[in-house]
Image (cartoon, helix red, strand yellow):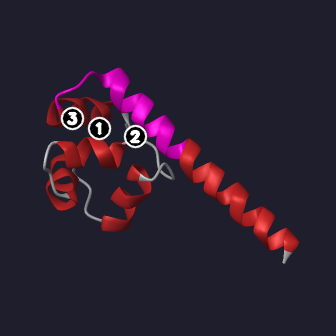
Amino acid sequence: MNLVELRKSKGLSPSFVRQKLGIVSPKHFWRIETGQGYLTKERIEILAKLYGCKKSEIVEASKECREIHQALDDALNKIKEVS
């Protein structure tokens, strides 16, 4: 399960979670949820409490988001090469 799925499974809005993490910018939060940004240890702990899971699950979910994002980037680059 990735970070977006974890948040949605708890019925939490992006703005609520951003507030709890102390993140003002929606873009910054979006980057974290899509694997383009990184979480601090403190934010991992906050997310684990909010989502009711272990810190290791947050780390794994973040890793999954980065892997998905990388796969999409790779696919787009291959399409550009062919075009």
Give the labeled residue for mark 1: 43
Residue drawn at point x = 43 percent, y = 29 percent:
60
Q: Position of residue 64 (x, y in %)?
A: 49, 38
**Residue 56 part of the magenta segment:** yes
Would residue 34 be counted in the magenta stretch? Answer: no
Spot the residue most to the right: 82
The reply to whether dot 1 and dot 2 touch (C-beta < 8 Å) is yes
CB within 8 Å, label 3 to label 1: yes
Question: Which callout, 3 or 2, points at the residue further toward the start of the chain?
Answer: 2
Q: What residue type is disc 1 on?
A: Arg
Q: Residue at x 44, y 57 (%)?
A: 31
Q: What residue type is labelled 3?
A: Ile
Q: Distance between the residues labelled 3 and 2?
A: 10 Å
- Cα separation, mark 1 vs mark 2, equals 6 Å
Helix, strand or loop for disc 1: helix
Mark 3: secondary structure = helix
The residue stretch that appears in magenta: 52-66
What mark, if any, has residue 46 been given in the picture?
A: 3
Q: Residue 28 carries which label?
A: none
Structural crowding at the residue carrying mark 2, measured as other residues with C-alpha within 10 Å and reported as few (<14), some (14–19) or many (≥20):
some
Residue drawn 13% across the image and 49% down it: 11
Pointer 1 local density, CA inside 10 Å: few below 14, some 14–19, many at least 20: some
User: Which is nearer the eye, 16 or 69?
Assistant: 69
Give the secondary structure at mark 2.
loop
On the picture, is 41 further left or further right than 9?
Answer: right
Q: In which quarter of the image is residue 6?
A: top left
Q: Within the image, what quadrant is residue 2 found in?
A: top left
Q: Quadrant of the N terminus?
A: top left
Q: Position of residue 17 (x, y in %)?
A: 19, 51
Q: Mark 2 points at which residue?
A: 39
The image position of residue 68, as x and y in percent, is: 55, 48
Q: Is the magenta stretch mostly helix, strand or loop?
A: helix
